[in-house]
Amino acid sequence: MSERTTAILLIAVVALGAMTGVAAADSHLEVAVDKDADGTSTVTVTENDTAVENATVNVTVVDPANESYAGAGEYETDENGTVELEAPQEDVTVEVTAAAGNDSASTTVELEAPDGLELEVDDEDGEPVVTVTDNDTAVENATVNVTVADPANESYAGAGDYETDANGTVTLPAAEEDVTVEVTAEYENDSVSETVELEAPDDLELEVEDTDEEPVVTVTNDDEAVANATVVVALADDGGENASYAGTGEYETDEDGTVELPAAEENVTVDVTAEYENETVSETVELTAGEEDEDDEADAGTPFGQLVREFIQGLKDRNSDIGGAVSDFVTENNPGNAPDHAGGPGGPDEADDDEADNETDAPGNGNAPEGVGNGQGGPPDHAGNGDDDADDEDGADDEDAEEDEAEEDEDDDEEEEDDEEEADDDDDDDDDAGPGNGNGNGPP
């Protein structure tokens, strides 16, 4: 072989060796661990993204002094390059090493124990609901057993055995009184228990407030307002034969669970009954009539003319324009709304007519009755000596004059003072008047 040929062959061998080294360098073994929902794990070994069959997989516990794992050991990958690891009994950290040929790869992973069989008891809506799950998945046909924790002192109608439905749930009856129970769920040789306190629901309740004003009835069920509940109000059996109340009858609660009743006009005892979804609740309450204001009672017994006079006398500045103040007082205390004894029912015109009549009828003030003072006799029998009757008529005149003063819109202080002076002059004239001061020469 010539030297040239030998050199060419040598170059080819070196090049081939270089190519082999690159391929070896490009080879890359990888290992990955995927954890499943049920607690099991899958180890996958690949080389250049290709599954490696018959690769060796070794699983060891990172902290064997404090943790353990039944799945620790050596495995061999299948044709898919995978190995299945069992679920741990408790959370554990492991190291997984894969080896194929002269290459190896490792990874550290924490394996979590599955949730396993679990149960939950929801007692918020009155009727307890038991839910059974296995690894967070609803379990159908699981057995649920309910027992009373202290049967010597407590009882529960819902004690017994049940089977979960397709949603993994069991609905228990509401407790009639608070009770502590133990609930146990069993499924595929696994079991779980929990001790819970079941609270009796509040059921249907009613409350009556503002019994001395306009009563308000409030209906609740499990502390929630009940709309459209029927409320019946009736006189109590022991309320008395003469008792009455305008608010008796049937009502329906609004969206707030309330009914407003009319105020009682007199003290009365009533029975209030609420009905809702085959449940009823009753309460006997005493409704009291509201107390009338003392000032109103006092004013109701005072004649209106006197009220006006007291108002005018109470004004601090009598020299100012009091007409507006008096007008406002009369408007606010309208005599038309006053009781019958509060004074004359008529207005200013009637008052003027009354005053004119008083002036005409008074003895000795002008036109005397026929036969008086014409020489045919003395004054009539009812005339007296002119003192007592005149005083009575003076009081009537004063009251009528004050009513006129109050009900008319007085323009200024001067008119008010003139009215008072005229009233005083009338009083003086009436005091001086005697019986039969007509133009006649009757016998003494």
Image (spheres, rainbow, N blue to C red):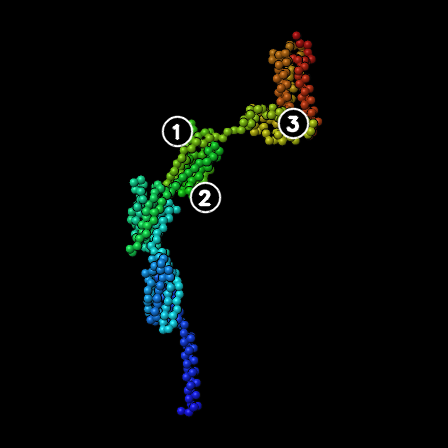
Q: Which mark is residue 255?
A: 2
Give the residue type at disc 1: Asp
Give the residue type at disc 2: Glu
SS state under label 2: loop
Which residue in the structure is indicated by mark 3? 315
Query: 31 and 433: which one is in front?
Result: 31
> Residue at position x 69%, y 19% from top?
425
Q: Dots 1 and 3: beta carbons under 8 Å? A: no
Q: CA distance from mark 1 to mark 3?
A: 54 Å
Q: Residues within 10 Å of mark 2 (few under 14, many from 20)?
A: few
> Residue at position x 48%, y 33% from top?
213
Number of dots carrying numbers:
3
Which residue in the structure is indicated by mark 1? 238
SS state under label 3: loop
Name which of mark 1 and mark 3 comes first in the sequence.
1
Can residue 233 be seen? yes
Image position of 240 with respect to 382: above or below = below
